[in-house]
Image (tube, rainbow, N blue to C red):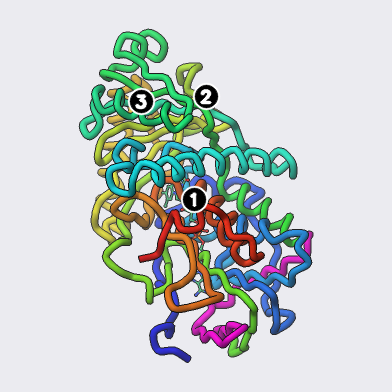
Amino acid sequence: MLDKYKSLTRRQTLCRDRPLWASIPGGTVRTRRRTPETEYDVIIVGAGISGALMSHAFIGKNLRILMVDRRAPVQGSSLASTAMIQHEIDTPLHVLQKSIGVRNAQRVWQRSAAAVKQLGRLVHDLDLKCAFQAKKTLFLAGEEYDARALSGEAEARRIAGLGVDLLSEETLQERFGLNRTAALESAISASANPAQLTAAVLRNAGKHGVEIVSGVEIKELKEFDESVVLSTSQGALLVARSVVFCTGYEFLKALANKRQKVVSTWALASRPRLSRPDWLDKYLVWEGSDPYLYFRSTADGRIVLGGEDDDTEDAYKDEKKRKLKSKTLAEKLGDLTGISIGEPDFEWSAAFGVTPNGLPMIGRVPNMKNVFTSMGFGGNGITFSQIAATLISSEILDHRDEDWDLFPIF
Ligand SMILES: Cc1cc2nc3c(=O)[nH]c(=O)nc-3n(C[C@H](O)[C@H](O)[C@H](O)COP(=O)(O)OP(=O)(O)OC[C@H]3O[C@@H](n4cnc5c(N)ncnc54)[C@H](O)[C@@H]3O)c2cc1C
Protein backbone atom coordinates (compact mmCIF):
# COMPACT_ATOMS: atom_id res chain seq x y z
CA MET A 1 0.00 0.00 0.00
CA LEU A 2 1.13 3.56 -0.55
CA ASP A 3 2.62 5.02 2.63
CA LYS A 4 0.95 8.32 1.92
CA TYR A 5 -2.45 6.70 2.21
CA LYS A 6 -1.74 4.70 5.35
CA SER A 7 -3.96 5.44 8.33
CA LEU A 8 -6.17 7.02 5.82
CA THR A 9 -8.51 9.59 7.32
CA ARG A 10 -8.32 11.83 10.36
CA ARG A 11 -10.02 10.49 13.44
CA GLN A 12 -11.62 12.75 15.96
CA THR A 13 -14.59 13.29 18.21
CA LEU A 14 -16.88 15.23 15.91
CA CYS A 15 -19.44 16.40 18.44
CA ARG A 16 -19.57 16.80 22.22
CA ASP A 17 -22.83 16.40 24.13
CA ARG A 18 -26.13 15.38 22.63
CA PRO A 19 -27.43 17.42 19.71
CA LEU A 20 -31.19 17.99 19.55
CA TRP A 21 -31.60 15.58 16.63
CA ALA A 22 -30.25 12.60 18.61
CA SER A 23 -33.41 12.72 20.74
CA ILE A 24 -35.86 12.64 17.81
CA PRO A 25 -36.84 9.32 16.19
CA GLY A 26 -36.24 8.73 12.49
CA GLY A 27 -32.50 9.30 12.34
CA THR A 28 -31.33 5.70 12.23
CA VAL A 29 -30.66 3.25 9.41
CA ARG A 30 -30.34 -0.52 9.41
CA THR A 31 -26.93 -1.68 8.28
CA ARG A 32 -24.91 -4.80 7.76
CA ARG A 33 -21.87 -5.45 9.94
CA ARG A 34 -19.88 -7.15 7.20
CA THR A 35 -19.44 -6.40 3.54
CA PRO A 36 -21.43 -9.03 1.62
CA GLU A 37 -19.24 -8.95 -1.51
CA THR A 38 -15.71 -7.84 -2.27
CA GLU A 39 -16.17 -6.25 -5.69
CA TYR A 40 -18.21 -3.16 -6.46
CA ASP A 41 -18.54 -0.49 -9.10
CA VAL A 42 -18.48 2.34 -6.57
CA ILE A 43 -17.54 2.35 -2.89
CA ILE A 44 -18.59 5.35 -0.86
CA VAL A 45 -16.75 5.88 2.42
CA GLY A 46 -18.86 7.76 4.98
CA ALA A 47 -22.57 7.51 5.84
CA GLY A 48 -23.35 11.14 6.61
CA ILE A 49 -25.28 13.60 4.45
CA SER A 50 -22.47 13.72 1.85
CA GLY A 51 -22.36 9.94 1.45
CA ALA A 52 -26.16 9.74 1.47
CA LEU A 53 -26.58 12.25 -1.36
CA MET A 54 -23.68 10.67 -3.24
CA SER A 55 -25.33 7.23 -3.05
CA HIS A 56 -28.64 8.72 -4.21
CA ALA A 57 -26.95 10.12 -7.31
CA PHE A 58 -26.06 6.56 -8.44
CA ILE A 59 -29.51 5.04 -8.01
CA GLY A 60 -30.97 3.56 -11.19
CA LYS A 61 -27.61 3.39 -12.99
CA ASN A 62 -27.30 -0.38 -12.67
CA LEU A 63 -24.18 -0.16 -10.51
CA ARG A 64 -23.12 -2.23 -7.50
CA ILE A 65 -22.71 0.34 -4.74
CA LEU A 66 -21.25 -0.19 -1.28
CA MET A 67 -21.23 2.37 1.51
CA VAL A 68 -19.01 1.80 4.56
CA ASP A 69 -18.67 3.75 7.76
CA ARG A 70 -16.63 3.11 10.86
CA ARG A 71 -19.46 4.54 12.95
CA ALA A 72 -23.17 3.85 12.67
CA PRO A 73 -24.77 6.00 9.92
CA VAL A 74 -25.54 9.63 10.81
CA GLN A 75 -23.24 9.71 13.82
CA GLY A 76 -20.71 12.15 12.36
CA SER A 77 -21.03 15.90 11.82
CA SER A 78 -24.39 15.45 10.11
CA LEU A 79 -25.92 14.76 13.51
CA ALA A 80 -24.48 18.00 14.90
CA SER A 81 -25.62 20.21 12.03
CA THR A 82 -28.11 23.01 12.62
CA ALA A 83 -29.31 22.38 9.05
CA MET A 84 -29.91 25.86 7.75
CA ILE A 85 -29.91 24.87 4.07
CA GLN A 86 -28.85 27.97 2.22
CA HIS A 87 -27.67 29.16 -1.15
CA GLU A 88 -26.23 32.15 0.73
CA ILE A 89 -22.80 30.76 1.35
CA ASP A 90 -20.41 32.14 3.97
CA THR A 91 -18.40 34.24 1.52
CA PRO A 92 -20.53 36.98 -0.01
CA LEU A 93 -20.58 37.01 -3.81
CA HIS A 94 -18.97 40.45 -4.11
CA VAL A 95 -16.07 39.22 -1.94
CA LEU A 96 -15.71 35.83 -3.64
CA GLN A 97 -15.53 37.56 -7.03
CA LYS A 98 -12.30 39.23 -5.95
CA SER A 99 -10.59 35.94 -5.12
CA ILE A 100 -11.82 33.54 -7.82
CA GLY A 101 -13.09 35.90 -10.53
CA VAL A 102 -16.57 37.12 -11.38
CA ARG A 103 -17.69 34.20 -13.52
CA ASN A 104 -16.53 31.47 -11.16
CA ALA A 105 -17.98 33.24 -8.13
CA GLN A 106 -21.30 33.63 -9.92
CA ARG A 107 -21.28 29.95 -10.85
CA VAL A 108 -20.57 28.97 -7.21
CA TRP A 109 -23.55 31.00 -6.03
CA GLN A 110 -25.80 29.83 -8.86
CA ARG A 111 -24.83 26.20 -8.21
CA SER A 112 -25.61 26.67 -4.54
CA ALA A 113 -29.07 28.00 -5.36
CA ALA A 114 -29.66 25.09 -7.76
CA ALA A 115 -28.47 22.61 -5.10
CA VAL A 116 -30.94 23.89 -2.50
CA LYS A 117 -33.77 23.60 -5.03
CA GLN A 118 -32.61 20.10 -5.96
CA LEU A 119 -32.67 19.06 -2.29
CA GLY A 120 -36.20 20.43 -1.97
CA ARG A 121 -37.29 18.37 -4.97
CA LEU A 122 -35.64 15.26 -3.59
CA VAL A 123 -37.45 15.60 -0.28
CA HIS A 124 -40.74 16.25 -2.07
CA ASP A 125 -40.43 13.51 -4.70
CA LEU A 126 -39.42 10.82 -2.20
CA ASP A 127 -41.73 12.19 0.48
CA LEU A 128 -38.88 12.15 2.99
CA LYS A 129 -40.01 12.72 6.57
CA CYS A 130 -37.40 15.17 7.81
CA ALA A 131 -39.20 18.35 8.92
CA PHE A 132 -38.10 20.04 5.71
CA GLN A 133 -39.47 23.58 5.43
CA ALA A 134 -38.81 26.06 2.61
CA LYS A 135 -37.74 29.36 4.12
CA LYS A 136 -36.46 32.81 3.32
CA THR A 137 -33.20 34.19 4.65
CA LEU A 138 -32.38 37.44 6.42
CA PHE A 139 -28.72 38.37 6.27
CA LEU A 140 -28.20 41.21 8.72
CA ALA A 141 -25.55 43.92 8.46
CA GLY A 142 -22.90 43.41 11.13
CA GLU A 143 -19.37 44.38 12.08
CA GLU A 144 -17.81 42.63 9.09
CA TYR A 145 -20.34 43.57 6.41
CA ASP A 146 -22.08 46.90 6.98
CA ALA A 147 -24.99 48.49 5.09
CA ARG A 148 -22.67 49.66 2.31
CA ALA A 149 -21.22 46.17 1.84
CA LEU A 150 -24.73 44.71 1.73
CA SER A 151 -25.70 47.18 -0.96
CA GLY A 152 -22.71 46.04 -3.06
CA GLU A 153 -23.66 42.44 -2.37
CA ALA A 154 -27.24 42.99 -3.50
CA GLU A 155 -25.99 44.45 -6.77
CA ALA A 156 -23.56 41.56 -7.37
CA ARG A 157 -26.33 39.03 -6.74
CA ARG A 158 -28.77 40.78 -9.06
CA ILE A 159 -26.18 40.75 -11.85
CA ALA A 160 -25.78 37.01 -11.24
CA GLY A 161 -29.55 36.56 -11.60
CA LEU A 162 -30.09 35.75 -7.94
CA GLY A 163 -33.15 37.35 -6.42
CA VAL A 164 -32.51 39.54 -3.38
CA ASP A 165 -34.02 42.59 -1.67
CA LEU A 166 -31.99 45.16 0.21
CA LEU A 167 -33.90 46.20 3.33
CA SER A 168 -33.26 49.57 4.96
CA GLU A 169 -32.87 50.12 8.69
CA GLU A 170 -36.45 51.41 8.87
CA THR A 171 -37.96 48.48 6.93
CA LEU A 172 -36.07 46.00 9.05
CA GLN A 173 -37.37 47.60 12.21
CA GLU A 174 -40.91 47.88 10.92
CA ARG A 175 -41.28 44.35 9.52
CA PHE A 176 -39.09 42.37 11.90
CA GLY A 177 -38.46 44.59 14.91
CA LEU A 178 -34.71 44.15 14.37
CA ASN A 179 -32.27 46.95 14.95
CA ARG A 180 -29.55 46.77 12.29
CA THR A 181 -28.48 49.25 9.62
CA ALA A 182 -29.59 47.00 6.72
CA ALA A 183 -30.35 43.43 5.71
CA LEU A 184 -30.63 41.26 2.62
CA GLU A 185 -33.81 39.25 2.23
CA SER A 186 -33.77 36.33 -0.15
CA ALA A 187 -35.72 33.18 -0.93
CA ILE A 188 -34.38 29.69 -1.87
CA SER A 189 -33.52 28.44 1.60
CA ALA A 190 -34.83 25.69 3.83
CA SER A 191 -34.38 23.99 7.14
CA ALA A 192 -34.69 20.33 8.09
CA ASN A 193 -33.89 17.76 10.71
CA PRO A 194 -30.45 16.75 9.34
CA ALA A 195 -30.44 13.33 10.98
CA GLN A 196 -33.84 12.41 9.56
CA LEU A 197 -32.90 13.85 6.17
CA THR A 198 -29.68 11.83 5.99
CA ALA A 199 -31.27 8.66 7.32
CA ALA A 200 -34.24 8.92 4.95
CA VAL A 201 -31.97 9.34 1.91
CA LEU A 202 -29.89 6.36 3.10
CA ARG A 203 -32.93 4.16 3.70
CA ASN A 204 -34.14 4.96 0.20
CA ALA A 205 -30.69 4.12 -1.20
CA GLY A 206 -30.82 0.83 0.72
CA LYS A 207 -34.16 0.01 -0.90
CA HIS A 208 -32.55 0.58 -4.29
CA GLY A 209 -29.76 -1.90 -3.65
CA VAL A 210 -27.02 0.21 -2.05
CA GLU A 211 -25.30 -1.99 0.57
CA ILE A 212 -24.70 -0.01 3.76
CA VAL A 213 -22.18 -1.43 6.21
CA SER A 214 -21.29 0.10 9.56
CA GLY A 215 -18.46 -0.55 12.01
CA VAL A 216 -16.00 -0.97 9.17
CA GLU A 217 -13.12 1.42 8.78
CA ILE A 218 -11.23 1.88 5.56
CA LYS A 219 -7.57 1.71 6.56
CA GLU A 220 -5.56 1.83 3.37
CA LEU A 221 -5.97 2.27 -0.34
CA LYS A 222 -4.02 1.46 -3.44
CA GLU A 223 -4.93 2.33 -6.98
CA PHE A 224 -4.28 0.11 -9.97
CA ASP A 225 -4.96 0.94 -13.63
CA GLU A 226 -8.68 0.28 -13.63
CA SER A 227 -9.45 -0.50 -10.01
CA VAL A 228 -8.94 0.68 -6.46
CA VAL A 229 -8.26 -1.72 -3.59
CA LEU A 230 -9.26 -0.80 -0.05
CA SER A 231 -8.28 -2.65 3.09
CA THR A 232 -10.71 -2.66 5.99
CA SER A 233 -10.49 -2.86 9.76
CA GLN A 234 -12.01 -6.36 9.44
CA GLY A 235 -9.01 -7.47 7.41
CA ALA A 236 -10.94 -7.67 4.13
CA LEU A 237 -9.84 -6.32 0.79
CA LEU A 238 -12.48 -4.52 -1.25
CA VAL A 239 -12.16 -3.74 -4.93
CA ALA A 240 -14.00 -1.00 -6.79
CA ARG A 241 -13.82 0.79 -10.09
CA SER A 242 -14.27 4.11 -8.25
CA VAL A 243 -14.08 5.17 -4.62
CA VAL A 244 -15.54 8.34 -3.14
CA PHE A 245 -14.45 9.60 0.27
CA CYS A 246 -17.35 11.43 1.90
CA THR A 247 -15.68 11.56 5.28
CA GLY A 248 -16.49 15.14 6.24
CA TYR A 249 -14.05 16.77 8.65
CA GLU A 250 -12.26 13.44 9.00
CA PHE A 251 -10.74 14.08 5.62
CA LEU A 252 -7.99 12.08 3.97
CA LYS A 253 -4.80 12.81 5.89
CA ALA A 254 -2.90 13.09 2.64
CA LEU A 255 -5.03 16.14 1.83
CA ALA A 256 -4.30 17.99 5.06
CA ASN A 257 -2.75 21.25 4.06
CA LYS A 258 -2.93 24.91 4.85
CA ARG A 259 -6.15 25.44 2.96
CA GLN A 260 -8.29 23.46 5.32
CA LYS A 261 -8.50 23.63 9.02
CA VAL A 262 -10.74 22.28 11.75
CA VAL A 263 -12.05 24.84 14.23
CA SER A 264 -14.72 24.77 16.96
CA THR A 265 -18.36 25.76 16.92
CA TRP A 266 -21.31 25.77 19.33
CA ALA A 267 -25.07 25.31 19.03
CA LEU A 268 -28.10 25.11 21.26
CA ALA A 269 -31.81 24.47 21.09
CA SER A 270 -34.52 25.93 23.27
CA ARG A 271 -37.49 24.04 24.63
CA PRO A 272 -40.37 23.51 22.13
CA ARG A 273 -43.19 25.98 21.59
CA LEU A 274 -41.09 28.92 22.70
CA SER A 275 -42.72 32.32 22.46
CA ARG A 276 -41.34 33.92 19.28
CA PRO A 277 -42.34 36.42 16.59
CA ASP A 278 -44.55 34.95 13.82
CA TRP A 279 -42.12 35.92 11.06
CA LEU A 280 -39.34 33.75 12.51
CA ASP A 281 -40.98 30.50 11.39
CA LYS A 282 -40.53 31.59 7.78
CA TYR A 283 -36.91 32.77 7.98
CA LEU A 284 -33.34 31.69 8.62
CA VAL A 285 -31.35 34.54 10.14
CA TRP A 286 -27.61 35.20 10.19
CA GLU A 287 -25.36 38.20 10.33
CA GLY A 288 -22.31 39.72 8.68
CA SER A 289 -20.10 39.55 11.76
CA ASP A 290 -17.16 37.41 12.79
CA PRO A 291 -17.91 35.38 14.87
CA TYR A 292 -21.50 35.36 13.75
CA LEU A 293 -24.81 34.41 15.28
CA TYR A 294 -27.35 32.44 13.29
CA PHE A 295 -30.76 31.11 14.27
CA ARG A 296 -33.98 29.58 13.06
CA SER A 297 -37.03 27.86 14.47
CA THR A 298 -37.98 24.18 14.21
CA ALA A 299 -41.33 22.69 13.26
CA ASP A 300 -42.16 22.17 16.97
CA GLY A 301 -41.36 25.77 17.86
CA ARG A 302 -37.87 25.49 19.27
CA ILE A 303 -35.23 28.02 18.41
CA VAL A 304 -31.95 26.53 17.22
CA LEU A 305 -29.05 28.93 17.31
CA GLY A 306 -25.34 28.69 16.81
CA GLY A 307 -22.06 30.31 15.89
CA GLU A 308 -19.38 31.88 18.07
CA ASP A 309 -16.79 29.87 16.14
CA ASP A 310 -13.38 29.69 17.74
CA ASP A 311 -10.25 29.35 15.65
CA THR A 312 -8.80 26.55 17.74
CA GLU A 313 -9.32 22.87 17.06
CA ASP A 314 -9.92 21.62 20.59
CA ALA A 315 -11.92 24.46 22.14
CA TYR A 316 -15.20 22.60 21.58
CA LYS A 317 -14.10 19.93 24.04
CA ASP A 318 -13.84 22.43 26.89
CA GLU A 319 -16.88 22.20 29.17
CA LYS A 320 -16.39 25.65 30.70
CA LYS A 321 -16.10 27.20 27.28
CA ARG A 322 -19.31 25.51 26.18
CA LYS A 323 -21.25 27.08 29.01
CA LEU A 324 -19.73 30.48 28.23
CA LYS A 325 -20.43 30.20 24.51
CA SER A 326 -24.04 29.10 25.12
CA LYS A 327 -24.55 32.09 27.37
CA THR A 328 -23.06 34.45 24.78
CA LEU A 329 -25.22 33.02 21.99
CA ALA A 330 -28.40 33.30 24.09
CA GLU A 331 -27.53 36.88 25.09
CA LYS A 332 -26.83 37.89 21.50
CA LEU A 333 -30.17 36.45 20.43
CA GLY A 334 -31.92 38.27 23.27
CA ASP A 335 -30.23 41.60 22.47
CA LEU A 336 -31.16 41.35 18.82
CA THR A 337 -34.69 39.96 18.98
CA GLY A 338 -35.87 40.30 22.56
CA ILE A 339 -36.40 36.50 22.62
CA SER A 340 -35.48 34.88 25.91
CA ILE A 341 -34.68 31.21 25.39
CA GLY A 342 -34.39 30.41 29.10
CA GLU A 343 -32.58 27.21 30.03
CA PRO A 344 -31.75 25.45 26.73
CA ASP A 345 -33.00 21.88 26.26
CA PHE A 346 -29.87 20.99 24.27
CA GLU A 347 -26.38 22.46 24.07
CA TRP A 348 -23.68 20.94 21.91
CA SER A 349 -20.26 21.79 20.55
CA ALA A 350 -18.53 20.37 17.54
CA ALA A 351 -15.58 20.30 15.21
CA PHE A 352 -16.11 22.45 12.16
CA GLY A 353 -14.05 22.42 8.96
CA VAL A 354 -13.23 25.67 7.21
CA THR A 355 -11.26 26.92 4.24
CA PRO A 356 -10.02 30.50 3.71
CA ASN A 357 -12.58 31.31 1.00
CA GLY A 358 -15.38 29.21 2.51
CA LEU A 359 -15.54 26.89 -0.49
CA PRO A 360 -15.39 23.11 -0.29
CA MET A 361 -12.96 20.95 -2.23
CA ILE A 362 -14.62 18.56 -4.62
CA GLY A 363 -12.84 16.39 -7.14
CA ARG A 364 -10.27 13.72 -7.84
CA VAL A 365 -7.76 12.99 -5.13
CA PRO A 366 -4.47 14.33 -6.57
CA ASN A 367 -2.44 11.73 -8.47
CA MET A 368 -5.34 9.30 -8.50
CA LYS A 369 -7.61 8.47 -11.40
CA ASN A 370 -10.57 6.79 -9.77
CA VAL A 371 -10.51 8.10 -6.21
CA PHE A 372 -12.64 11.13 -5.45
CA THR A 373 -13.48 13.17 -2.44
CA SER A 374 -15.99 15.71 -1.35
CA MET A 375 -15.11 17.74 1.68
CA GLY A 376 -18.25 19.67 2.51
CA PHE A 377 -16.72 22.33 4.61
CA GLY A 378 -18.12 25.20 6.60
CA GLY A 379 -21.56 26.49 7.36
CA ASN A 380 -23.02 25.33 4.05
CA GLY A 381 -21.98 21.72 4.19
CA ILE A 382 -25.38 20.35 3.21
CA THR A 383 -25.67 22.54 0.12
CA PHE A 384 -22.09 21.67 -0.86
CA SER A 385 -22.77 17.96 -0.32
CA GLN A 386 -25.53 18.14 -2.91
CA ILE A 387 -23.23 19.92 -5.38
CA ALA A 388 -20.51 17.33 -4.73
CA ALA A 389 -22.92 14.46 -5.34
CA THR A 390 -23.87 15.91 -8.72
CA LEU A 391 -20.32 16.74 -9.84
CA ILE A 392 -18.63 13.52 -8.73
CA SER A 393 -21.38 11.15 -9.85
CA SER A 394 -21.37 12.78 -13.31
CA GLU A 395 -17.60 12.38 -13.53
CA ILE A 396 -17.78 8.70 -12.55
CA LEU A 397 -20.65 8.16 -14.98
CA ASP A 398 -18.58 9.75 -17.75
CA HIS A 399 -20.51 12.95 -18.37
CA ARG A 400 -18.30 15.69 -17.08
CA ASP A 401 -20.21 18.54 -15.48
CA GLU A 402 -19.45 22.00 -16.88
CA ASP A 403 -18.55 23.12 -13.33
CA TRP A 404 -16.29 20.17 -12.59
CA ASP A 405 -13.32 22.48 -11.92
CA LEU A 406 -15.17 24.96 -9.73
CA PHE A 407 -14.08 23.56 -6.34
CA PRO A 408 -10.48 22.44 -6.90
CA ILE A 409 -8.46 20.37 -4.48
CA PHE A 410 -5.14 22.19 -4.24
C1 LIG B 1 -22.54 22.51 14.76
C2 LIG B 1 -22.62 22.46 13.27
C3 LIG B 1 -23.57 23.21 12.62
C4 LIG B 1 -23.68 23.15 11.23
N1 LIG B 1 -24.67 23.85 10.63
C5 LIG B 1 -24.86 23.73 9.30
C6 LIG B 1 -25.94 24.39 8.68
O1 LIG B 1 -26.73 25.08 9.33
N2 LIG B 1 -26.11 24.21 7.34
C7 LIG B 1 -25.25 23.42 6.60
O2 LIG B 1 -25.45 23.30 5.39
N3 LIG B 1 -24.20 22.81 7.17
C8 LIG B 1 -23.98 22.94 8.50
N4 LIG B 1 -22.95 22.30 9.09
C9 LIG B 1 -22.04 21.54 8.24
C10 LIG B 1 -22.63 20.18 7.88
O3 LIG B 1 -23.28 19.65 8.98
C11 LIG B 1 -21.49 19.25 7.46
O4 LIG B 1 -20.82 19.81 6.36
C12 LIG B 1 -22.02 17.90 7.05
O5 LIG B 1 -22.79 17.34 8.06
C13 LIG B 1 -20.86 16.99 6.73
O6 LIG B 1 -21.43 15.78 6.32
P1 LIG B 1 -20.50 14.60 5.86
O7 LIG B 1 -21.38 13.51 5.43
O8 LIG B 1 -19.49 15.14 4.89
O9 LIG B 1 -19.68 14.22 7.18
P2 LIG B 1 -20.14 13.29 8.42
O10 LIG B 1 -21.55 13.46 8.75
O11 LIG B 1 -19.13 13.55 9.49
O12 LIG B 1 -19.96 11.83 7.84
C14 LIG B 1 -18.67 11.34 7.51
C15 LIG B 1 -18.59 9.90 7.94
O13 LIG B 1 -17.35 9.35 7.46
C16 LIG B 1 -16.98 8.33 8.37
N5 LIG B 1 -15.54 8.02 8.18
C17 LIG B 1 -14.49 8.87 8.28
N6 LIG B 1 -13.35 8.23 7.98
C18 LIG B 1 -13.69 6.93 7.71
C19 LIG B 1 -12.93 5.76 7.35
N7 LIG B 1 -11.59 5.80 7.19
N8 LIG B 1 -13.59 4.59 7.17
C20 LIG B 1 -14.97 4.53 7.33
N9 LIG B 1 -15.71 5.60 7.67
C21 LIG B 1 -15.09 6.79 7.85
C22 LIG B 1 -17.27 8.92 9.74
O14 LIG B 1 -17.42 7.91 10.71
C23 LIG B 1 -18.56 9.71 9.47
O15 LIG B 1 -19.72 9.00 9.87
C24 LIG B 1 -22.79 22.34 10.48
C25 LIG B 1 -21.83 21.58 11.13
C26 LIG B 1 -21.74 21.62 12.51
C27 LIG B 1 -20.70 20.79 13.18
Q: Is residue 209 magenta?
A: yes
Q: CA distance from mark 3 to mark 2?
A: 27 Å
1 or 3: tag closer to the N-terminus: 3
Q: CA distance from mark 1 to mark 3?
A: 24 Å
Give neighbour class at mark 3: few <14, some 14-19, many 20+ (Cα, 10 Å).
some
Q: Is residue 7 left or right of residue 53?
A: left
Q: Is residue 13 left or right of residue 67?
A: left
| Secondary element type, mark 1 | helix
* Residue that badge 3 annotates: 155
In the image, what residue type sits under mark 3?
Glu
Q: Is residue 34 magenta?
A: no
| Secondary element type, mark 2 | helix
Q: Which residues are magenta?
A: 207-233
User: Which quarter of the rendering shows the C terminus?
Assistant: bottom left
Please, is residue 138 above or below residue 410 in the view? above
Q: What numbered label is drawn on residue 281? A: 2
In the image, what residue type sits under mark 1?
Phe
Q: CA distance from mark 1 to mark 2?
A: 24 Å
Q: What numbered label is drawn on residue 384? A: 1
Q: Nearer the viewer, residue 232 or 106?
A: 106
Please, is residue 135 above or below residue 69 in the view? above
* Residue 354 at x, y percent in the picture: 34, 55
Question: Which of labels 1 and 3 is toward the front?
Answer: 3
Give neighbour class at mark 2: few <14, some 14-19, many 20+ (Cα, 10 Å).
some
Q: Tell me the residue at 60%/38% (across/down).
A: 117
* Residue 334 at x, y percent in the picture: 32, 25
| Secondary element type, mark 3 | helix
